[in-house]
Image (tube, rainbow, N blue to C red):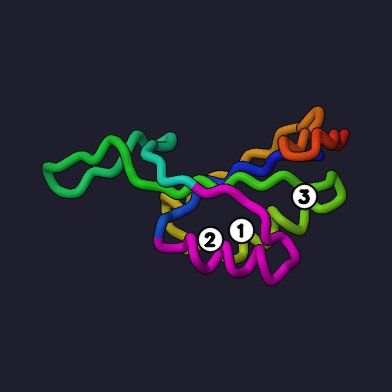
Amino acid sequence: MKLVRAFIRPEKEQEVVLALEGAGFPALTKMSVLGRGKQKGLKIGDVTYEELPKTLLLIVVKDEEVEKVVNTIMNHARTGNIGDGKIFVSPVEKAITIRTGEVEV
């Protein structure tokens, strides 16, 4: 299993979530977060915004589904401008369902 963490523009959240659901991935967690990338924020005139709002999507999927999830996110989150976001993929050792105690490895 893999954990896909996607930091995307807040205005793209609904489009990405609906696309993931349509692709067969309805289960996810989303959070509003603040952060910045390599460019260290955004400067407009004399004003610098050091932290920008993003939406963080967390999705755990089978190894063979990672590419489909990543492509779905990229195709629906991309605007072509700086600040479109970042996707991280990490291994998941196991998942435990609290209600039943079922363990997935």
Q: For mark 3, what is the residue?
A: 66
**Proximity of marks 2 and 1: CB atoms separated by less than 8 Å:** yes
Front one among 31 and 77: 31
Q: Which of pointers 3 and 1 indicates the residue nearer the eye?
A: 3
Front one among 11 and 40: 11
Q: Is residue 17 magenta?
A: yes
Residue type at numbered disc 2: Ala
Could you give the CA–CA distance between mark 2 and mark 1, rounded to whole angstroms? 5 Å
User: Is residue 25 shown left or right of residue 46?
Assistant: right
- Give the x, y percent position of residue 65: 81, 53
- Label located before the other in sequence (3 or 1): 3
- Give the x, y percent position of residue 87: 60, 44
Could you give the CA–CA distance between mark 3 and mark 1, rounded to whole angstroms? 12 Å
User: Is residue 73 shown left or right of residue 33?
Assistant: right
SS category of the residue bearing label 2 = helix
Residue 50: name its quadrant. Answer: top left
Q: Which residue is pictured at 77% across the width and 53% down the height?
A: 67
- Label located before the other in sequence (2 or 3): 3
Total marks drawn?
Answer: 3
Which residues are drawn in magenta? Answer: 11-30
Q: Which residue is pictured at 38% across the width and 37% down the height?
A: 36
Residue 27: name its quadrant. Answer: bottom right
Graded by Cα atoms within 10 Å as few (under 14), some (14 to 19) or many (20 or more), the crowding at tag 1 reads some
Residue type at numbered disc 3: Val
Q: For mark 2, what is the residue?
A: 77
Q: Which mark is residue 74?
A: 1
